[in-house]
Amino acid sequence: MTLGGLLSGPPAVVAAGVDVFSDALRAQGAEVHDVDWRPPGFGSAEDIADVALDPRRASANRAAVERILAAGSQLVDVRPAAEVIGLRDRMLLHSGPPLTWETASGPMRGALIGACLFEGWATDVEDAERILANGEITLDPCHHHRTVGPMAGVTSPSMWMWCLKDPVHGGSDKNMAFCNLNEGLGKVLRMGAFNEEVLTRLAWMRDVLGPVLQSAVRSRSDDPIDVKAILAQMLQMGDEGHNRNRAGSLMALRELSPSIVAVDAPSSDIAAVLKFIGGNEHFYLNLGMPTAKLAMDAARDVPGSSMVTVMSRNGTEFGIQTAGTGDRWFTGPANTPVGLFLGDYGPDDANPDIGDSAIMETYGVGGFSMAAAPAIVRFVGGTVPDALATTERMYQLTLAENPAMAIPIMGFRGSPTGIDVLKVARTGWLPQINTGMAGRIAGTGQVGAGLVQPPQECFEKALAALAEESRTA
């Protein structure tokens, strides 16, 4: 039909993009004319051709996806970081790709300062800043230690860690992943706050919460909690696994409560632990993240695979890794989320994107499964149709669907899983992440929540590296 025919005939709609829009309009009786159009991609034609024509790529991606889908996640222990990941004195882990004190953003600096005060390495804020600036504290990414941490992700030797095991891919270090315990919302270390309230809570978590959880989890050694099963059920109950964890946190509390009340500890401590977990809607997040980490680590080191295994940010840079390039980071400047703000905070108060929690999107939940949690838009912004369209769009960037992570409103279609660098480059679309927002000034804490995408530069660099690797294979 010509443009003139469209204008002279009955009202019609010209649709360009994913089929979900056209199908929805047709269901309402509209006349729809589809236009085969996609946004321009990126990357050199030579790099795209070399990756696309790599004879290893199809089988390598298939193998990587199979490992992800098969991976499990069991909660097997709770231990201090100094014991479980060999975190030595005067060493701190952080989220995202490598950084230095000089390149650290405000919330990252706030969390590092708070950790130094918590560990007793510094007497006050100025002393903490001095030892950090002098390089007396070793900084290293959580991902280098099979660990993930939300927001700043700062983990110190005295902090207790969730210890999760993949029972499927045993026999190596890859079948374990770790994460510290979630502090709750508001003024918290992971958001860059370090006042007395934060330090008092961290001390209680060290002295009471950690030991109680350890006893409770170890009492279930013959029947470990299936954390992946909780994540799958969350998607049936209105959570998406990143910024909405209400159902997951309650299910975790249900699983742990019988063991917690049986712990040989003062009743006041047991009551405080149960109250803390019950009042923390993000308690499950720090279990979900290492669950995703286990699955993505299972797909590491698959030569020829163009699948993303890590997306992470440190508040300054965003970094990704791929199955075909191992531990190499491909980085670019972190973008600032756009969304909803708490109280009187506004866009000028928000720090650029930060946290290892984008491992949830890398796994296919979080922003990729927003259709499972339409209520999330009240926290991060947007509309319910936006949430549905986002999930539909993410299917265009991924290699498979995860049948264990079914999305009810999508007809129980599996979540979009296995981000393909080549598909991202060809479409020009970038993965969608929903996230909390930390204040850009150290000590502020959380200022809101919103939506963000990685910088295109990360995928351009990864594409070039994959192309180079294919030429030399």
Image (tube, grey):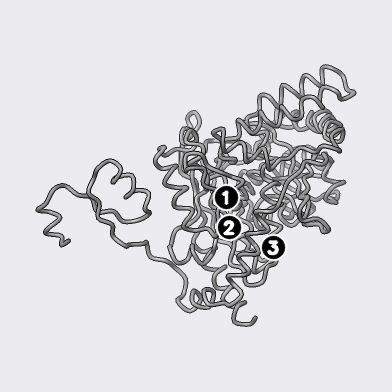
Locate the C terminus by quadrant: bottom right
- Which percent across, then down, holds residue 166? 76, 50
At 72% from the left and 21% from the top, the residue drawn is 275
Residue under the image location 60 percent in, 58 percent down:
319
Residue annotated with mark 2: 418
- Residue 127's quadrant in the figure? top right
Q: Are marks 2 and 1 in contact (CB under 8 Å)?
A: yes
Label 2 – label 1 distance at C-alpha: 7 Å
Amino acid type, label 1: Gly
Which residue in the protein does label 3 denote?
300
* Mark 3 crowdedness (10 Å alpha carbons): few <14, some 14-19, many ≥20: many
Q: Is residue 182 left or right of residue 163?
A: left
Instruction: Give the left or right position of residue 453, taking residue 17 as reference.
Output: right
Q: Quadrant of residue 61?
A: bottom right
Which image quadrant: the N terminus? bottom left
Marks 2 and 1, the one that precedes in the sequence: 1
Q: Amino acid at mark 2?
A: Gly
Secondary element at tag 2:
strand
Mark 1 to mark 3: distance in Å? 16 Å
| N-terminal label among 3 and 2 | 3
Element type at mark 3: loop
In this view, the residue in front, 89 or 10, is: 10
Q: Give the CA distance from mark 3 to mark 2.
A: 12 Å
Q: Residue furthest top?
A: 267
Measuring from the top left, give residue 303's x and y in whole percent.
Answer: 66, 71
Q: Which residue is labeled 1 in the image?
A: 364
